[in-house]
Image (cartoon, helix red, strand yellow):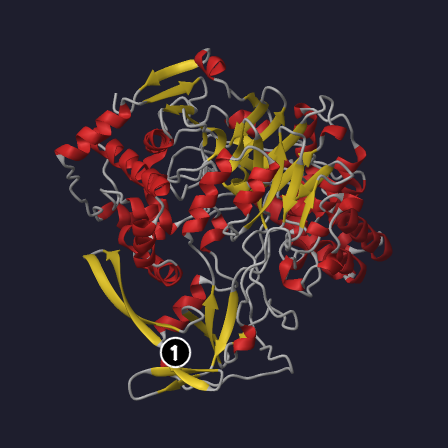
């Protein structure tokens, strides 16, 4: 019904009015730029200046998928409800609470000249595309403003997440006007910690990054493996050059002007998500006053700042408005109420230094140069795996990390009434968890603990405060460490093979527990015997690796997903049991019924849907790309392709997260491996890559899904990094607008 409404009610259009001076300026800049599309449709952008390169990059991105470019900024402006309807209203409010457009404008006005030039070129590149493509009808944004770049400054999915606060928290608090209730803070410990109930936990699969030192490579050059796990089509593959020293290749988040994960001729970087505490929830003591509300802080009552936010949303009658009064303390926006606690959040979701850092790292010339960029301390949501042409490898677990009083558990809601819980500056780069050139010769991070990042050469947990690295171990981390420690003489092809290791280590714990329960409890006269005997036989013989033809894999994955969320949880808070230990505990303590009943449910479900239980994983697990809808609809009757890979939650290193959808019997992938690349830093860069689907969002383009089968098989293409190689594979060579 929601889709129907979108189709029936035309999206409000805005006129594209550009001045003669603007158009002349854009055309002059376009003459300084050459875009070469190679045989995969990948844009190689060449400009005289960095600003020229940015202009060309954004023009090329819009050619490939303007819809995604625009939607990323509709979201960061807090205006999705104007396009998608009222259901997005509180997502918009969430964004407007944590990302202030007025602050972005102020930052733009005071930005250094070099950064302002890039931001201006960014807006010009998009606007020139709209001018030269009048057939393109924006959903909302007919003119892009340079300060938009300061709404989203690091390129990560996690950049718009704030602690454990969810959209539902926002809706609960503001739709029910809970500030009007009298509240009191409840201290429950001598340290001032506060109890929080019904805390939502995140369950993500994350990303993998490997760095291999010259001592473990065949060539004697460092190798970097880049493997982000994101929603499909979240980042395209691009190459950007200028005569000012820019030569960078990798993945760019739609609508941004810097390579988020990639490499230049000197070094490369891979970002992995982590659970470093970069934002905090404060319980505020609030009282009503004659003029509004006050909150208690250091024994004084201070006024709660009120801000009226006007939200617009689309419904069947047109564009409607809703004004919501929001509240702020000096900590940040008041986001929700849990129990008797009114909770504000302190965070750093956008930062001009973050945008500077995101750009400057693309021009880093090696480890020491990269450290200087890291010293800006503005990356709020990621760890970094690094390698360079001098043979250095490095890892940093986070970057923006507030310095805090160690006696508090910062994973909990903190007492907001005292100055003792304030941030005390930031940790410098050498204080955060890191490793430089470990003696083991390898680094891996798979959203796992940094204390196993390099085997015996890993940092020691005792040397760091708890809030700096609450992350626990997971099965990907276990698998990656095993592979990297046991191999030598790595090449690009060998590191790709390592990155595509499909051993699912979780099942070496779970399946034996299932079999033990079966052997101990199921007899020939049991009602389970006939139904489970053959499936158990198949599982008993399984090697815990994936295959399109594997019946055991289909049984195991469907079964394991019914065992409870705890064994799939990658990110943990301080003091929680990590995935590996939680899985082992479950396997040791689960009753036969907890293990056997889910298997019977799987068998019954397969029989109901397919008339048999012997279903191969590739029959069930599919890749489908039939449209460029932001929310793709899946259809069993349309073309799809088998995929052997599965969720990396079970320990396999490549990720392919699939689900059932309304009306489907089959599972369809939506996230996992996206842009994957291996690069060797020798005298001449060597690299291979693969991209989910293809670089174009145009269903009629040959590059809409020309990498699809490669993606499903883990087959890589040669990266064209040098101009002379690009010129040999030209599909199209042109200037923006021509």
The answer to whether residue 613 is visible is no
Q: Position of residue 433 (x, y in %)?
A: 66, 52
Residue ID at (41%, 41%): 632
The residue lying toward the viewer, choosing from 224 and 632, is 224
Which quadrant of the figure has residue 334?
bottom left
Above or below 660: residue 548: above
Which quadrant of the figure has residue 483?
top right
Q: Is residue 181 left or right of residue 20?
A: right
Label 1: few (<14), some (14–19) or many (≥20) C-alpha neighbours in 10 Å? some
The residue lying toward the viewer, choosing from 46 and 236, is 46
Residue ID at (40%, 26%): 242
Which quadrant of the figure has residue 97?
bottom left
Q: Secondary structure at mark 1?
A: helix
The answer to whether residue 319 is visible is yes
Quarter of the C terminus within the rendering: top left
Residue topped by disc 1: 178
The extreme left residue here reads 20
Q: Position of residue 205 (x, y in %)?
A: 60, 48
Q: Is residue 444 left or right of residue 58?
A: right
Q: Position of residue 289 (x, y in %)?
A: 33, 88
Q: Position of residue 516 (x, y in %)?
A: 84, 53
**How many numbered discs, if any?**
1
Residue ID at (29%, 40%): 120
The residue lying toward the viewer, choosing from 177 and 589, is 177
Above or below 573: residue 519: above
The extreme bottom residue here reads 290
Q: Is residue 434 left or right of residue 514?
A: left
């Amino acid at each position: 019904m929601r889709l129907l409404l979108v189709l029936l009610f035309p999206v409000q259009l805005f006129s594209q009015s550009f001045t003669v001076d603007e158009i002349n300026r854009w055309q002059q800049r376009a003459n300084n730029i050459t875009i070469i599309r190679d045989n995969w449709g990948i844009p190689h952008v060449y400009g005289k200046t960095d600003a020229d390169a940015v202009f060309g990059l954004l023009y090329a991105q819009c050619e490939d998928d303007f819809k995604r470019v625009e939607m990323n900024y509709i979201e960061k402006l807090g205006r999705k409800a104007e396009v998608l309807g009222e259901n997005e209203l509180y997502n918009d409010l969430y964004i407007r609470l944590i990302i202030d457009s007025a602050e972005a404008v102020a930052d733009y006005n005071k930005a250094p000249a070099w950064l302002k030039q890039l931001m201006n070129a960014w807006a010009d590149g998009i606007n020139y595309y709209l001018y030269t493509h009048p057939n393109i009808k924006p959903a909302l944004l007919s003119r892009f403003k340079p300060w938009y770049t300061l709404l989203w400054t690091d390129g990560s999915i996690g950049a718009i997440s704030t602690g454990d606060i969810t959209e539902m928290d926002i809706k609960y608090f503001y739709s029910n006007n809970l500030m009007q209730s009298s509240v009191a803070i409840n201290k429950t410990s001598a340290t001032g910690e506060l109890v929080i109930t019904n805390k939502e936990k995140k369950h993500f699969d994350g990303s993998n990054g490997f760095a291999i030192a010259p001592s473990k490579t065949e060539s004697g050059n460092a190798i970097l493996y880049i493997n982000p796990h994101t929603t499909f089509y979240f980042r395209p593959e691009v190459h950007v050059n200028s005569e000012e020293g820019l030569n960078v290749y990798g993945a760019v988040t739609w609508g941004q002007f810097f390579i988020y994960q990639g490499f230049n001729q000197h070094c490369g970087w891979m970002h992995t998500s982590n659970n470093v505490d970069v934002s905090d929830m404060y319980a505020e003591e609030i009282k009503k006053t004659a003029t509004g509300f006050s909150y208690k802080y250091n024994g004084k009552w201070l006024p709660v700042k009120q801000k009226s936010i006007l939200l617009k949303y689309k419904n069947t009658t047109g564009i409607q408005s809703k004004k919501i009064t929001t509240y702020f303390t000096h900590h940040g926006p008041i986001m929700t109420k849990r129990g008797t606690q009114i909770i504000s959040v302190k965070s750093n979701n956008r930062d001009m230094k973050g945008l500077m850092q995101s750009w400057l790292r693309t021009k880093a010339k090696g480890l020491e140069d990269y450290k200087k960029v890291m010293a800006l301390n503005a990356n709020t949501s990621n760890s970094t795996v690094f390698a360079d042409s001098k043979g250095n490898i490095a890892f940093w677990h986070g970057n923006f990390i507030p310095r805090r009083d160690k006696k508090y558990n910062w994973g909990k809601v903190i007492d907001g009434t005292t100055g003792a819980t304030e941030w005390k500056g930031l940790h410098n780069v050498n204080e955060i968890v890191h490793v430089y050139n470990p003696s083991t010769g390898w680094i891996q991070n798979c959203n796992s603990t940094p204390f196993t990042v390099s085997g015996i050469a890993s940092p020691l947990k005792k040397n760091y405060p708890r809030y700096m690295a609450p992350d626990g171990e997971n099965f990907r981390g276990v698998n990656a460490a095993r592979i990297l420690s046991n191999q030598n003489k790595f090449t690009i092809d060998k590191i790709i093979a390592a990155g595509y290791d499909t051993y699912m280590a979780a099942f070496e714990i779970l399946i034996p527990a299932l079999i033990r329960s079966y052997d101990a409890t199921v007899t020939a006269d049991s009602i389970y015997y006939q139904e489970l005997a053959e499936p158990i036989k198949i599982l008993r013989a399984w090697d815990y690796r994936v295959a399109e033809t594997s019946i055991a894999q289909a049984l195991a994955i469907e079964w394991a997903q019914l065992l409870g969320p705890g064994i799939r949880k990658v990110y943990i808070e301080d003091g929680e049991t990590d995935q590996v230990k939680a899985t082992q505990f479950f396997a040791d303590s689960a009753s036969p019924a907890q293990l056997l009943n889910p298997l019977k449910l799987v068998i019954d479900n397969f029989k109901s849907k397919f008339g048999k239980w012997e279903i191969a994983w590739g029959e069930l697990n599919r890749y489908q790309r039939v449209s460029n809808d932001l929310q793709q609809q899946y259809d069993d009757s349309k073309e799809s392709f088998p995929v052997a890979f599965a969720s990396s939650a079970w320990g396999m290193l490549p990720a392919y997260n699939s689900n059932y959808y309304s009306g489907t019997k089959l599972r369809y992938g939506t996230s996992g491996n996206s842009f994957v690349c291996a690069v060797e830093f020798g005298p001449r860069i060597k690299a291979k890559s693969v991209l989910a689907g293809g670089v174009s969002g145009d269903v009629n383009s040959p590059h809409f899904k020309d990498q699809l089968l490669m993606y499903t098989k883990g087959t890589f293409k040669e990266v064209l990094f040098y101009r002379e190689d690009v010129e040999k594979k030209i599909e199209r060579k042109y200037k923006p607008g021509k």
